[in-house]
Amino acid sequence: MIILEDVHFSYPAGTVALNSVSLEIPAGSFLALMGANGSGKSTLLKHINGLLEPKAGRVSVGGIAVGKNSFDEISGIVGFVFQDPNDQIFAPTVLDDICYGPRNQGLGEEEACSRARLAAAQVGISNLLERPIHHLSYGQKKRLSIAGVLAMEPRVLVLDEPTASLDPGGEERLMRILIGLHRQGMTIVMATHDVDLVPLYANTACLLDRGAVAARGPLREVFSDAGLIRRCHLRLPRISSLFDMIPGIGELPLTVGMARRQLEELLESRAPAPMPDRTQETFHA
């Protein structure tokens, strides 16, 4: 679905944000793009939908080269959700804001409103359609920004730190929305440095360090090198750090569910052997 080939990008001040980044993201993936602040996550995301163009290299989505000539086409495939919803929402009411994208695509009012209501239902804000956007909580604004993108029916959803500044309840609601969309077949690319959150939802990960790809692949593979994780100014998930203190534990679990299964197997392997049954020997004696 998404291919980056030897992508280089630097900002006008000379800061190198991406350095020879090559990455393939298959259709239907839920990719966590991880890295410390300033590692290049947001810059990479903006290359996927054409907000930025590489100084060198190539980006394509669905076989279409991303660039000025394909910007409108790519915008219909890739939906981009900014970190701060206040950078994205602007219309007087929730319904107006969600309708903006479909209207801009040239749809009639009836179809635009139909899409908007469906998108609002997907993110759980159907009861807020007539509410002014300045009366929304931060979490409601986050869900509104996603609804506005979903109303344009993209095949790829790109999100920049979607759980930033949310309380635990808001974080869980938003991530349940994303996992539901993923199960429906949507390709999701999510930038985050929340290493405890990633194993609960994503199936693959890409670790960036100073604009370069430090690791990519299945979660277990990416998190297997604790030293690399620390060198990239991140940490292991808390449950992994806890198990890292147990001698001979082997592969570190990434979630509580994994940890429970691994503990059960560990306890079974270390259980003392059962005492031999001496009943028959006593009887014959």
Image (cartoon, rainbow, N blue to C red):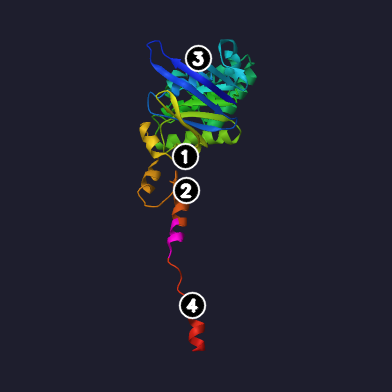
Instruction: Choose the circle earlier in sequence order: 3 or 4.
Output: 3
- Mark 3 surroundings: few (<14), some (14-19) or many (≥20) residues within 10 A: some
Residue 258 is marked as: 2
* Residue 229 magenta-highlighted: no
The mark lying in front, picked from 3 and 4, is 3
Residue 277 disc label: 4
Which corner quadrant holds the N terminus?
Answer: top right
Amino acid type assigned to the residue bearing label 1 in the image: Pro
Q: Are marks 3 and 1 in contact (CB under 8 Å)?
A: no
Mark 4 nearby-residue class (10 Å; few <14, some 14–19, many ≥20): few
**Foreground mark, 4 or 1?**
4
Which is nearer the eye, 175 or 198? Answer: 198
Callout 2 crowding tier (Cα within 10 Å): few <14, some 14–19, many ≥20: few
Count the marks: how many?
A: 4
Q: Neighbour class for label 1 at 10 Å: few (<14), some, many (≥20)?
A: some
Rendered location of residue 65, percent (x, y): 59, 16
| Residue range (magenta) | 266-271
Q: The disc labelled 3 sits on which kind of residue?
A: Ala
Above or below: residue 188 compared with residue 196: above
Query: Which circle's residue, 4 or 1, is located before the other in the chain?
Result: 1
